């Protein structure tokens, strides 16, 4: 998808979902094509490299607990993040 804000900041993200080891994975990369203050870029810049995983844990025959984890690295800001959660 291509994201754009009112200030003409543009962000392109590409995701590739796949299954491995019985888990649902998603590899993602995001970039901005030109200079923007919002993403702190002076030109083309990769702003997001992520790997996420999810799995539904069966609790009963009629209820599953959807868990997820995602590791994200922003090469532009040199920040790294790890998120774990569940969905309702």
Image: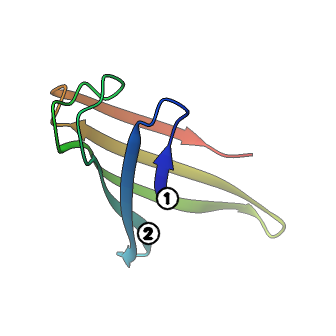
Q: Residues within 10 Å of mark 1 (few under 14, many from 20)?
A: some
What residue is drawn where x is 38% and y is 56%? 13
**What residue is at 48 percent from the left and 29 percent from the top?**
7
**Residue 51's quadrant in the figure?**
bottom left
Task: List the single residue furthest toward the right.
Answer: 62
Residue 76: x %, y % from top left = 17, 32
Question: Where is residue 74 shown, x and y percent of the image?
Answer: 23, 35
Distance (Cα) linking label 2 and label 1: 6 Å
Asked if the residue at tag 1 contacts the one at tag 2, i.e. Cβ–Cβ closer than 8 Å, the answer is yes
**Left or right side of 63 for 79:** left
Q: Quadrant of residue 56?
A: bottom right
Name the N-terminal-most of marks 2 and 1. 2
| Residue nearest the observer in this picture, 54 or 8 | 8
Relative placement, left or right, of 21 versus 35 is: right
Residue shown at 55% from the left, 33% from the top:
6
Q: What mark, if any, has residue 23 been given in the picture? A: 2
Looking at the rendering, which quadrant does residue 81 occupy?
top left
Q: Dot 2, how many residues are within 10 Å of its Cα: few (below 14), some (14-19), or many (20+)?
A: few
Asked which colour scheme the image uses, the reply is: rainbow
Q: Is residue 77 left or right of residue 56?
A: left
User: Observer-nearest residue: 52 or 66?
Assistant: 52
- Residue 12 is labelled as none
Query: Where is mark 1, residue-wise?
Result: 54
Report the residue at 16% width, 38% height from top: 43
> Tag 2, which secondary structure?
strand
């Amino acid at each position: 998808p291509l994201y754009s804000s009112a200030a003409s900041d543009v962000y392109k993200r590409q995701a590739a979902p796949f299954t491995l080891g019985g888990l649902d994975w998603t590899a993602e990369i995001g970039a901005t094509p030109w200079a923007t203050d919002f993403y702190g870029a002076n030109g083309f810049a990769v702003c997001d490299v992520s790997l996420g995983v999810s799995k539904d844990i069966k609790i009963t025959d009629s209820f599953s607990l959807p868990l997820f984890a995602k590791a994200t690295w922003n090469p532009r800001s040199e920040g790294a993040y790890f998120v774990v959660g569940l969905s309702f």
